[in-house]
Amino acid sequence: TVHTVSNDPNQPAEWDNLQMACDSASVGDTIYIQGTATDYCTGITGGVLHLKKKLHLIGVGIKPEGNYLYGYPSYVSSIALDTVTYISGSSGSIIEGLKLSGLTTFNGCENIVFRRNRVMSSLAMNYSSNLLIVNNILHGGSSFYLSTNVLFMNNISLSSISSSGNSCIISNNLFVLNGGAVFSGCQSSTITNNIFYYSNVTGATY
């Protein structure tokens, strides 16, 4: 089932509250999130969208500011994938086309696709497995502590990657850090075909 969400009364949709839409949707449903001037986490307890089931979230795109008629992003400031250790209800979710301050995964989360998003702060996908992070603009740091089978590919990163392990592939990315170190505590990862612009590539071993 496809659901629509808009928190702009001038652009009505099926839902005006994103958390309620996610809670009411069935496993595997798709939720289209309209670009508006208001953060979709406004009014949600703690200011965090909690995703506790497998869903496909689709926003208006990675940089809608180029569209002068409909220039607002789908801004969901913070998303948490599950909140209970080893309860991985949101496994299998796809998140794309959103503007975020940050995203956090909790223990046991797996099979997550995170693509064509813009992250203004941190991407903390720790203790998880089978992660595809592709075609994003990442302003803050990305962490993959004790995560396995991670593919980090075709991203533009303006900050560092930390704690990637031996089953992490970091490929075909553009790193622009203005002199900062790209890696921190990364061991035995496969790092290939990237461009490092004004970036210090220390911090990766083996």
Image (cartoon, grey):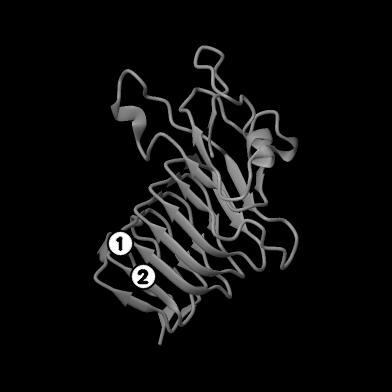
- Local packing at callout 2 (Cα closer than 10 Å; few below 14, some 14-19, many 20+) is many
Which residue lies at the image location 54% right of the left edge and 17% below the top edge? 12
Vertical order, 135 against 68 (above or below): below
**Any mark on residue 92, and which?**
none
* Residue denoted by label 1: 173
Q: Residue furthest bottom?
A: 206
Q: In terms of secondary structure, where does tag 1 sit? A: loop
The answer to whether residue 182 of the structure is visible from this angle is no
The local secondary structure at tag 2 comes to: strand
Q: Which residue is at 51% across, 12% downward?
A: 10
Query: Does residue 76 appear to the left or right of 82 in the view shown?
Result: left
Are the residues flagged by discs 2 and 1 in contact, CB closer than 8 Å? yes
Q: Quadrant of residue 206?
A: bottom left
Q: Residue at x 69, y 41 (%)?
A: 23
Please identify the residue farthest to the top as the structure is shown. Answer: 10
Which residue is at the front of the view, 198 or 31? 31
Q: Quadrant of the N terminus?
A: top right
Q: Percent x, y for residue 51? A: 64, 48
On screen, residue 192 above or below 81: below
Q: Which residue is mark 2?
A: 170
Image quadrant in which you'd find residue 203:
bottom left
Residue in the picture at 37% in, 40% down: 62
Please state which of residues 196 and 48 is positioned toward the viewer in this rendering: 48
The reply to whether residue 7 is in sight is: yes
* Pick the front one: 152 or 33: 33
Q: Position of residue 112 (x, y in %)?
A: 51, 60
